[in-house]
């Protein structure tokens, strides 16, 4: 699964062309599942429906920024 959705050159809600918008869908889905499970509710699984799945091969390295662009390393 590709962890990204690239919105480059698409039109936003007010008619503007998006130039560099890329969303890390893996992070978005993980955040949504955390809202459903909570930290201490003992809910082990979240089923996410309606998310488009693109079965391309991607490695975790595609999520990492180069060190010179990473504010947290």
Image (tube, rainbow, N blue to C red):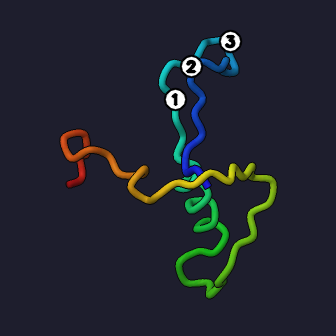
Kindly identify which residue carries mark 2.
18
Q: CA distance from mark 2 to mark 3?
A: 9 Å
Closer to us: mark 1 or mark 3? 1
Of 14 and 71, the residue lying toward us: 71
**Mark 2 neighbour class, 10 Å CA radius: few under 14, some 14 to 19, many 20 or more:** some
Q: Position of residue 1 (x, y in %)?
A: 62, 55
**Which x, y percent locates residue 58?**
52, 54
Question: Crowding near pointer 1: few (<14 within 10 Å), some, many (20+)?
Answer: few
Reply above or below: 23 against 11: below
Q: Position of residue 63 (x, y in %)?
A: 42, 51
Quadrant position of the C terminus in the picture: bottom left
Please tell me which residue is depicted at 26% across the width and 44% down the height of the picture.
Answer: 66
Cα–Cα gap, marks 1 and 3: 15 Å
Image location of residue 45, percent across then percent down:
68, 79
Position of residue 57 in the picture relative to residue 73 (left or right): right
Residues tagged 1 and 2 counted as in contact (Cβ below 8 A): yes
Label 3 secondary element: loop
Secondary structure of the residue carrying numbered label 2: loop
Q: Which mark is residue 10?
A: none
Residue under label 3: 15
Residue at mark 1: 21
Residue depicted at 24% across the width and 39% down the height: 69
For the residue pair 61 and 69, the one nearer the viewer reads as 61
Query: Secondary structure under badge 1?
Result: loop
In this rendering, position of residue 60 left or right of residue 17: left
Question: In the rendered view, would you say 61 is above or below 4?
Answer: below
């Amino acid at each position: 699964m590709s962890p990204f959705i690239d919105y480059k050159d698409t039109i936003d809600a007010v008619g503007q062309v998006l130039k560099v918008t890329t969303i890390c869908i893996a992070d978005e889905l993980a955040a949504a599942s955390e809202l459903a499970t909570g930290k201490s509710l003992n809910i082990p699984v979240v089923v996410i429906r309606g998310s488009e799945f693109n079965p391309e091969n991607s490695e975790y390295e595609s999520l990492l920024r180069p060190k010179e662009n990473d504010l947290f390393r």
